Image (cartoon, helix red, strand yellow):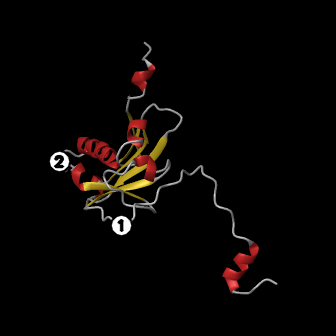
Amino acid sequence: KKVPVALLRHRICVVPVRGPSVSVCWGGGSSAMKITLRYEEADEKELHMTLRLTLPKKYQTGPSKDVVKLFADHYNKKHAEHPLDAAVLHLKVVGGNHLELGAKMEDFVASGDECYLLGGEVLTDSEAPAKRVPASAPAPPAPAPVAAAAAAGGAKAE
């Protein structure tokens, strides 16, 4: 029996990988955002969880609070005795910023990023978090040899 393509986009498949980690995937389009979410706030290792998932467009263009809720709902199904409250969690991009709950995912998270779910409030500075550049963006040019030599030893080229 064939399933309409529209229904395939919303199908969730969960595949166990190494220990308490799971992989969640959706059928999707060409602009897939694949991320890894980790929760390691609990003292007991058996309560830690990692989700590797491909975000549907709805979550890519939506606020980070929707992704936090998605994770918390999945976690709470596995650990009903120790439920997470999505309202007190936020995302922190590894090597990057803590995201406010209203931050648009596609503005701050790139495909391939890893994020931790952390408790507590997000401290806000006067500046907004830096926007992410997708991994496929070209790298900045290498410094000129004269500038590199000056930075390394302070010698001037003549």
Discs 2, 1 touching: Cβ within 8 Å: no
| Residue at image coords 24%, 41% | 77
**Whole-percent x, y for residue 5 in the image:** 45, 21
Secondary structure of residue under mark 1: loop
Please tell me whether residue 149 is drawn above or below residue 94 in the rendered image: below
Q: Amino acid at mark 1?
A: Ser
Please tell me whether residue 66 is drawn above or below residue 147 in the rendered image: above
- In the rendered structure, the answer to whether residue 63 lies left or right of residue 29 reads left
Q: What residue occupies the far left of the structure in this picture?
A: 81
Query: Relative to the observer, which residue lies in front, 110 or 115?
Result: 110
Q: How many marks?
A: 2
**Whole-percent x, y for residue 153 in the image:** 69, 85
- Please identify the quadrant where the N terminus is shown: top left
- In the rendered structure, the answer to whether residue 139 lies left or right of residue 111 reads right
**Residue at which label 1 appears:** 126
Distance between mark 2 and mark 1 Cα atoms: 39 Å
Residue 116: quarter of image: bottom left
For discs 2 and 1, the disc positioned in front in the rendered view: 1
Q: Amino acid at mark 2?
A: Glu
Label of residue 145 in the image: none
- Please identify the quadrant where the C terminus is shown: bottom right
**Residue at which label 2 appears:** 81
Q: What residue occupies the far top of the structure in this picture?
A: 1
